[in-house]
Image (cartoon, rainbow, N blue to C red):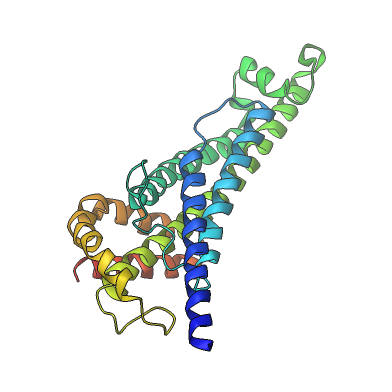
Amino acid sequence: DLHDEDVAVSIQLQSTGTQLQRHLINLLHSLQLPGKCTSADTDLEIQTIKLQIITNVVSYCVSAMGNSNVIHAVFSELGTKKGSNLNLLIGLLQKGLEASSHHSDAYSQLIHKALHVNQLSTEEQRELASCIAPDTDKCSAVQRAKYAELRLEQLAETKDKELSLYTQLIETLVFLLWRHVQYYTVYCKDPTEGVGGEPLPKKLLSANQDYIKNLTRELPLHLTDPLLKKVVDFCSNKSSSSMTSSFTSALVRRVRKLMTV
């Protein structure tokens, strides 16, 4: 009958959601945020591509939660051999904040050098210019400085692109973090709440109780005030639009409130 069909569809969707979560989590575990690299074009391109991939995967996690019948919280307490999924989320957030700070400083330094290229040493000008013109020995001092300035502008543009990606990544991670905490501290504690207007299965609620206890106990230890303050400070800088900055800051306030529930 129709009831049996609905139950079968629900089970199939839950199975699909579980598989999707595992794939996403395993993919994020296998990916690493890019570290420092040389100024070679190939290395810079690879670094930007890696960051773009991670940002896309994390953004897809949000899209995957758009259908509450399929997936409720990407970073659920699914058993993994690689540690807590929430730790993965917080770890990415910490690394993203640290990397964005480094890139912001590097971007400022590159802009400063480009504006004052004549103050650079001849050796540094020659090294920068060699990325534009192969034989810098045949260049005049004026040409060499111009090539060095152009190279600095290229590097600054790359850093600016990466800063935009880090901004998107951090804002998305904060959303996922809020969704995770809200799901377990609100919906899974109260069967009448449900998600998307649908009550959660009793079996799911029962299985989550131990995880909820651990979450409420350990969350303040990992999601500390200094970390949340870094997020708010990051959102207040010019790399974030005023709309997304206000939204992300509001999510941080909601997370803080949920941690006291």
Q: Residue furthest right?
A: 138
Question: Residue 174 lies in what quarter of the image?
Answer: bottom left
Q: Residue at x 49, y 39 (%)?
A: 30
Question: Does residue 131 sit above or below 226 in this rendering?
Answer: above
Q: Residue at x 42, y 65 (%)?
A: 248
Q: Residue at x 69, y 18 (%)?
A: 126
Question: Does residue 132 sit above or below 167 in this rendering?
Answer: above
Quadrant in which the C terminus is drawn: bottom left
Given residues 87 and 201, the one toward you in this image is 201
| Whether residue 239 is visible | no
Give the x, y percent position of residue 53: 59, 46
Q: Residue at x 47, y 71 (%)?
A: 11
Given residues 144 and 169, the one toward you in this image is 169
| Whether residue 128 is visible | yes
Given residues 86 and 119, the one toward you in this image is 86
Question: Residue 205 lies in what quarter of the image?
Answer: bottom left
Give the x, y percent position of residue 197: 42, 85
Count of numbered circles on the image: 0
Give the x, y percent position of residue 184: 30, 67
Question: Does residue 106 sit above or below 164 in this rendering?
Answer: above
253 to the left or right of 54: left
Given residues 14 and 261, the one toward you in this image is 14
1 to the left or right of 129: left
Question: Does residue 136 sit above or below 249 in this rendering?
Answer: above
198 to the left or right of 260: right
Q: Residue furthest front?
A: 1
Give the x, y percent position of residue 69: 49, 74
